[in-house]
Image: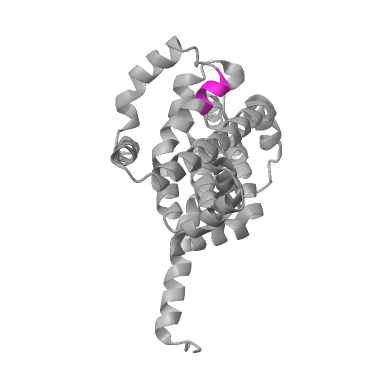
Amino acid sequence: MEQRYTKRVLILEIVTILLGLIFLIPFYFIIINSLKSFSEILLNTAAWPKEFQWNNYVEAWRRLQYPKVFLNSLLITVFSNLAIVVFCSMAAYRLVRSPNKISKIIFILFISAMVIPFQSIMIPLVRVTSQLGLLNSIPGIVIMYLGFGAGFSIFLYHGFIKSVPREIEEAAIVDGCSSFGVFWRIVFPLLKPITVTIIILNSLWIWNDFLLPLLVLQDQNLRTIPLATFFFFGQYTKQWDLALAALILGIIPLLIFFFFLQRHIIKGIIEGSIK
């Protein structure tokens, strides 16, 4: 049935567009001021640049040591996502397919971990990681992201796996497939929608995270983009032209990630919500 284009729909569209424009205002200020000279920013922050200062980006790139901090952020985000997807999917599968009291207790413990504020465990976290030799290492912070992301990811996988028909797995076992093979060959491909959703949510969190890298990665060579941007702001507080250009350089990788995966992101969220 074709929906009629009424005045109500028109008003909703106008309100939606206005709301969208309001959300874009901060991006407008950051972008135009990143292309101005410092004196021009002080005169009028809302005005269009008289002359585009593209050299701000060149200078910010150099002082930020962008290739190095980008590689650090990329390695941490990719390997953390990989660890979360592999271990959390297997854990959730076993918890769902073994419906006993122990599984329920373990699942409740994972869920309970989600409500613990990160600030309350910062000091013991640093002490324990120092004793285990995980400070100032990318594998160390990947393990920590796995621990912090496990509760939410297992919760999502747990709900999704319940909708997977058990008859498919039983048919595979009859055909001679092992338990390990049943999961990776039969069940895991069916988890693609929720896996995409989990990767998106965790990528946003890990890429933009500031507090955990600040505590764990004290070595200057291991700084991530948010961490390097923070020190850049601190070091050049009065040079807002360069600082804003550095901020844009930190946002660009996430924008590229969304543009390339837009179709999969929407599909994954829709299929995940249907399940």
Residue drawn at (44%, 21%), measured in percent from left and top? 215
The rendered magenta stretch, by its main secondary structure, is classed as helix
Residue drawn at (71%, 33%), measured in percent from left and top? 58
On the picture, is 274 further left or further right than 116? right
Q: Position of residue 210 (x, y in %)?
A: 47, 30
Q: Is residue 138 magenta?
A: yes
On-image quarter of the C terminus? bottom left
Q: Nearer the viewer, residue 11 or 90?
A: 90
Q: Nearer the viewer, residue 93 or 153?
A: 93
Q: Nearer the viewer, residue 78 or 106?
A: 106
Q: Position of residue 42 (x, y in %)?
A: 52, 39
Residue drawn at (56%, 15%), measured in percent from left and top? 219
Q: Is residue 38 visible?
A: no
Q: Is residue 266 visible?
A: yes
Relative to 9, residue 76 above or below? above
On the picture, is 15 further left or further right than 54? left
Q: How is the image coloured?
A: one colour
Marker count (numbered): 0
Relative to 116, residue 12 above or below? below
Q: What span is colored magenta in the figure?
A: 137-142
Q: Is residue 207 magenta?
A: no
Q: Position of residue 249 (x, y in %)?
A: 62, 38
Pick out the residue farthest to the top.
131
Q: Position of residue 2 (x, y in %)?
A: 51, 89
